[in-house]
Image (cartoon, grey):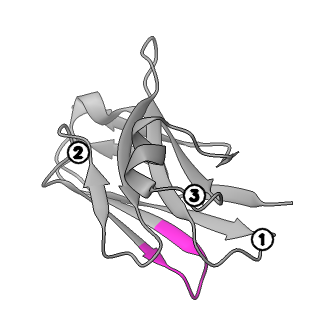
Amino acid sequence: QVQLVESGGGSVQAGGSLRLSCAASGYTYSRYCMAWFRRAPGKEREGVAAIATGGGVTYYADSVKGRFTISRDNAKNTLYLQMNSLKLEDTAMYYCAADFSGGYCYTVYVNANFDTWGQGTQVTVSS
């Protein structure tokens, strides 16, 4: 059974940084798209960033471009999200997701059509 476990969330002041991690286990697939999503209180889930298998292709929401960086270490089966210059509006529960169907990563990301999700890690940004 595939599992995704996020870590690295916490409380930080505006302008600060956090790095989220997502450890994947229980699979044998070699190609899979991964992404980060978030859901703020009272708001719908939002795609934050996605990364294709090789790590060379990434996608970002406009709201985080230039501040967040998604990366992956396939040898460690781990996905990362480096978040810099955090803003109050970045406060949310952050989830990682993986798709093992081999579909085009951008399409999977835009449609949030991932087959595996983590339990989430809370990020709280204060003034």
**Magenta segment boundaries in residue numbering:** 72-79
Mark in the foreground, 1 or 3: 1
Q: Is residue 58 above or below residue 12?
A: below
Which one is in front, 105 or 3?
A: 105
Residue occupied by mark 2? 86
Q: Type of residue at label 1? A: Tyr
Residue occupied by mark 3? 7
The residues tagged by marks 3 and 2 sit, at their Cα atoms, a distance apart of 17 Å
N-terminal label among 3 and 2: 3
The residues tagged by marks 2 and 1 sit, at their Cα atoms, a distance apart of 33 Å
Task: Report if residue 8 is visible in the image.
Answer: no
Q: Is residue 30 above or below residue 37?
A: below
Give percent across and percent down for residue 3. 76, 58
Q: Secondary structure at mark 3?
A: strand
Residue positioned 63% across, 67% down in the render? 23
Q: Quadrant of the C terminus?
A: top left
Q: Type of residue at label 2? A: Leu
Residue positioned 57% across, 58% down in the render? 7
Q: Is residue 38 left or right of residue 48?
A: right
Residue occupied by mark 1? 27
- Total tally of numbered discs in the picture: 3
Q: Type of residue at label 3? A: Ser
Q: Residue furthest right?
A: 1
Task: Report if residue 94 is visible in the image.
Answer: yes
Q: Residue furthest top?
A: 42
